[in-house]
Amino acid sequence: MELAEPTHKTTIWEKLSVERIKIELLRTAYGQSMTFLSRFDPRMLIGWYSFFAIAPWFIHNKTVLIGMLLAIAILTYTSKPSVLVLIVLAFGLVTDTAYMLIVALAFGGGFSAALALSTLTLKLLVIALASIAVFSSMDPEKLSDALLSLGMPAQFSFGVAYGYRMLPILIEEYNNLLYSYRLRGRAPLRKGFLGWRALVYMGKISVLAFYPLILNTAKRTRTTVEALEVKGFTYAVKDPRVKRIKLAYLKVLPRDYAFIIVSAIYVAFLFWLGSQFTL
Amino acid sequence: MTFQSTEEQPIIKLDNVTFRYPGAEANSLEGVSLSICRGDFIAIAGSNGSGKSTLCKCFNGLIPTYYSGDMEGTVLVDGLSTADHSVAELSKRVAYVFQDFENQLVRPTVYDEVCFAPLNFGYEDYKERGMNALRMLEIEHLRHEWIWQLSGGQKHMAALAAALALDPDVIVVDEPVAQLDPAHARVIYEKLKLLNERYGKTIVVIEHHTEFIADYCRNMVLMEKGGRVRWVKSVSEGLSAVSELTEMNIQPPQVTQAFHALRSEQAVERGIAYPITIEEAAAHWSPVVRRASFLSDTGESIVPPSSQAAGGEPLVCFEGVISGYQGIDRKKKPILQGIDLDIHEGDRIALIGNNGAGKSTLLRLISGLRRPWEGKVTVCGKDTRKSTPEELSDLVAFLFQNPEEMFIADNIRQDIEFFLKARKQEGIEPFIEDVLRRFKLTELQQRDGRLLSGGQQRRTTLAIGMAMRPTIMLLDEPTASLDIASRKELTLLFDQLREQVKAVVIATHDMQLVADWANRVIVMNEGRILLDTDSRTVFQHPEILDRAALIAPQIVQLCGRLGIEPACLSVEQFIAYMQRMPREELVYGIS
């Protein structure tokens, strides 16, 4: 029984454990309060972000896109994102590029077609890094208040903050449910080629564990809904005064304007540069 | 404990209230009339399903506004009829701390949580109100903590603070002891007492732990099946009704039980009040015992022999084990620091210690869910680092603290079969039927585990464990949040384990379980083993119990006060001890 193989397999599983993911997610959500971007007003950040999330779709000039990417990469670096998020992003990019190469070659487009498609990759990268930079710099509370301030319904903005509050508990419970499957189930005795049997088994219980999680959550919600009633939440939703008091702390400061202006000048410069030297 | 009478109108007044949940077949409350005076500290006791929570949800208008069932009668809160006012309006007068208080906390930090309700009501000074609530409970230092990082006791405190933020007159707390360890429960009660005495709040607790009722409450309400109020009495009078309480599955304080069993006919005739606290009991018995102390060493040994001396290979072996978790800052935080431990056949181990002492980590190491950073854990000759949890599950059954995390199939029968089905075993039906019958689950087998009562859920998890036919069984807090009847039943079922399972380890805060069941007790503190001994010896080390935030059973404490050594571990032993004293010494009722 005591082969070297199972030991090896489980250490990988431990490294990619649910607990690890929990820690990384929490770090992303609450970990850093003092990054460069976190100093700005969250509404301004959302506005800034929506430009960088939408504009790249309409820009076909690679010079501009690369310029944007450089600036955003630096901002992403200052917001100290979690390694896990970056790994997921890198994985997405690598598979994306590989897929494009295959498609381009298969349909006879050759290397030049693949190069053309790489513009799309560049766009995706700008948008993805902008999301990482902004959302790992903004804690869920600020995000929720900003959304409320921008006119989202109170239920929605509350939901965002509440979701984050529940996240660690849900992950913990999911982990324990997963353990329940493992402690009573049976892993395949033969691992198969590259351990595919073991991977299928893990994949299967990872999905199955969501069902009891959903049922448990549904049961738990009853108290939460009663508590919200008792705490006057339904009452507050209808009262504009509450919104005003709650958001009184949000203020757009000179540094927010400065940031917007610097960003605008930089983007304008990129367009000028792009018109001079098109890649 | 004196009865405090007030001339004012009662703060809560129910008049002939009957309530039925929508779609239910029977009434949950039946003709309830009840008055609660301003400034009272009152307990609502009753067996499971006697409508205690339903009654309390009438106080803040959740019934009938939120649950639109059939309601008759009137509920007046501070003169306001709950039928005509919104829940929000009534919440300013009556605060409610739910039994599953974790789900009541809806904001990310303690500070946000306490400010939430005042903010919702549009108070400009909501921050000040939130801080005031924290100040009242003296927990300002927790204000910037994330809710998910708090311990159970701190979460309960945060829920209480959030309820206080609206400065209500009445605070209703649903079973504070159920989810907390005894030391933390006592802290909560101390705070409630403070709120009652210093701030004049009316406190209503749903409680069946009579030792807490005796120590903190003034009056008590006894509810009976069908949602009727049996009586409302002062605590000392109420707890003296020993046979009535026992009939309702409520266990009177141990000292009261002992007195009840030992009382003379004379005392009954004269209607002497029973002692209900340790102080009263010590005052009552100390003259008798002091004269009889020369008898103290004649008692035969009642402790079952500890198996520590048993020879042979240990079933589980820890060698210099260090293990722990990774914190949010990616730093490794050791929980267990150099554990050496052998578990032998026949061991019934109670693993005790404060929260965070490393009990759960120790159990997880045995089950293989966690692996040691350093050192080695061997289970029946297998090194856990070289085996998967699936392989170890042939030897070890691990029952989680929260039963709902063990219900992974559509109904409990499938949950019980899961292990054997996964191993493709044939002809398991008779065995499964037998397990179901033994744990009284035959009737319930088609139900989803989540929809069962607390006691039924526990029985199910035990049945799941039994169906795995393990060599070693690990249980994490199996008696938490159970009422006395379910607890007793569970203790009986533990005896069934003894026939098949070679060693059982229970992590617990339940000192009565330690006294009644364990033959070996391991006290943990800060990741180390403080003491490894038998259940009698452990209670002779008050300084160790203190360090591990544990409280000995009342009868053990009483023996300590009376200087009875070795201490009696159960009421029966105490009664036997007292009865061995010369008859003429036992003159009751002279005080």
Image (cartoon, rainbow, N blue to C red):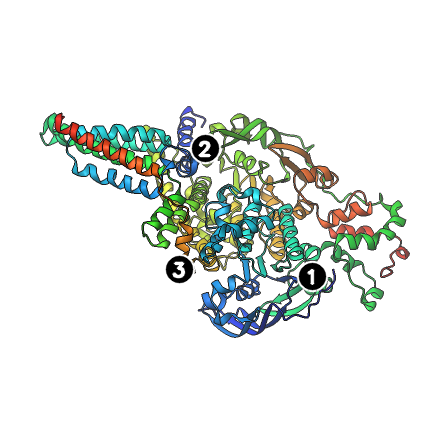
Q: Is residue A101 left or right of residue B219?
A: left
User: What residue would you read off at disc 1?
Assistant: B218
Q: Can residue B10 be seen?
A: yes
Q: Residues within 10 Å of mark 3 (few under 14, many from 20)?
A: some
Q: Residue at x 55, y 53 (%)?
A: B439
Q: Quadrant of residue B66?
A: bottom left
Q: Is residue B379 above or below residue B60?
A: above
Which of the two residues, B165 or B508, is positioned nearer the viewer here? Answer: B165
Which of the two residues, B204 or B113, is positioned nearer the viewer here? Answer: B113
Q: Is residue B293 left or right of residue B33?
A: right
| Residue B546 rendering spot, x and y as whole percentages | 69, 40
User: What residue would you read off at disc 2?
Assistant: B388
Q: Are marks 1 and 3 on the same chain?
A: no
Q: Amino acid at mark 2?
A: Thr
SS assignment at label 1:
loop
The chain carrying label 2 is B
Which of the two residues, A189 or A210, is positioned nearer the viewer here? Answer: A210
